[in-house]
Amino acid sequence: MPLHFELVTPEKLVRSDEVYMVVVPGTEGEEGVLEGHAPYMTTMKDGALKIYKTEGGAPEEIAVRGGFAEVSASGLTVLAERVEG
Amino acid sequence: MASLKELKNRIKSVKSTQKITKAKQMVAAAKLRRAQAAAEAARPYSQRLAKVMGSLAGKVSGESAPLLLRGTGKDERHLLVVVNTDKGLCGGLNANIVKAAKAKARELAAAGKQVDFYLVGRKGRAPIRRDYASQVKQEYDTSAVRNLGFTEAEAIAEELVALFEAGKFDVAHLIYPVFKSALAQDPTVVQLMPVPAVEGDGPVASDSSAVVEYEPDEETILGALLPRYIRTQLFVALLEREASEQGASMTAMDNATRNAGDLINKLTIQYNRSRQAAITTELIEIIAGAEAL
């Protein structure tokens, strides 16, 4: 089962995708989110989100600033103030 | 009665005015489409943020709540953040915003509160200064920026939060035009600080968030989110202002173009009449002269 992942900035919806895993740079440590993760909320350090499209594949990195991640039944939502690149 | 030459010049000048208003109308129409798209694109972020805020704010209360949520505990000094446009030629838009701001200021003053202003955009300055010269505390200039973005909203929010934390005011209201259609832009007043309790799906929020894990704790997250929420609100206000300005401008210029067309028709009829009158007089003179011989 893929994980539904959304990356949203004030300017637009950057990404809405089905992925395998996303590694979130939380303020209290990096954390990988897979499908079926328990409801969870964290603020993020300025850093790179690592998106694994498939299991074992090479990650795609998106640098974000001022981010905030929320995991709910509908998937992972990252609200970021800025996305670089 | 104006002479033929005068009429001709008049028609020429109205025609060139019409060309200008028509061009401005088309520019506004193109820009409006862009502004509307930008406002549309900003919606998911603000909606999601509001939802998260709603579920968090319900949990944190009392003394542990951040200053931005619980306020200074007083209700004495109010700050009105008025968002106006930088350019004119947009009908009654700015006049309406200023009117709404002044009405709010009078209402607060009548209740015995102290009112200050923070102005965004150039067109609100003169009319508000006229009545409240000493109460305009600060201004933020957006006229040099071509494409209004999150950077400006961030800068304004930072300044406001700093003022709030320094205890310069107790309550801040944001006054900005909400774009409804090209014909209607309603000036709206919302409370900006302290952040008002988000109402709505209360039970649903507490239901689904009962098991949510927070990292770090709720207070810290809320503390980080509140300034962000204010920034987003200002950003939305700026986007709405942009769309409203273009919409109002489009309508105003459409009217102006039509008025110019009517005026040209009227002047042309007048011109033709006096031309014919002149010809008739001349003919009569010639015939009368010929008969006299």
Image (tube, rainbow, N blue to C red):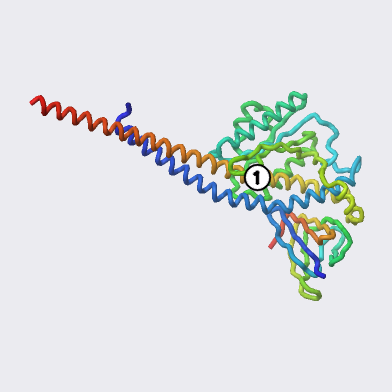
Instruction: Let me know if residue B139 appears in the view.
Output: no
Place of residue B125 in the rendered image (x, y in percent of width and height, measured from the top left):
62, 33
Q: Is residue A5 left or right of residue B216?
A: left
Q: Is residue B248 left or right of residue B216?
A: left
Quarter of the figure with residue B172? top right
Residue located at (54% from left, 43% from top):
B250
Place of residue B66 in the rendered image (x, y in percent of width and height, measured from the top left):
86, 43
- Quadrant of the drawing holding the C terminus of chain B: top left
Quarter of the figure with residue A14? bottom right
Q: Nearer the viewer, residue B135 or B215?
A: B215
Residue located at (39% from left, 37% from top):
B264
Question: Where is A72 relative to B99, above or below?
Answer: below
In terms of secondary structure, where does tag 1 sit?
helix
The residue carrying pointer 1 sits among few (fewer than 14), some (14 to 19) or many (20 or more) residues within 10 Å by Cα, namely many
Marks counted in the figure total 1
Dot 1 falls on which chain? B
Q: Nearer the viewer, residue B180 or B235?
A: B180
Question: Where is B101 relative to A68, above or below?
Answer: above
Which residue is denoted by mark 1 in the rendering? B240
Residue located at (65% from left, 40% from top):
B177
Q: Nearer the viewer, residue B26 or A23?
A: B26
Q: Is residue A4 left or right of residue B21?
A: right
Instruction: Let me know if residue A14 appears in the view.
Output: yes
Residue located at (68% from left, 50% from top):
B150
Place of residue B47 in the rendered image (x, y in percent of width and height, measured from the top left):
75, 50
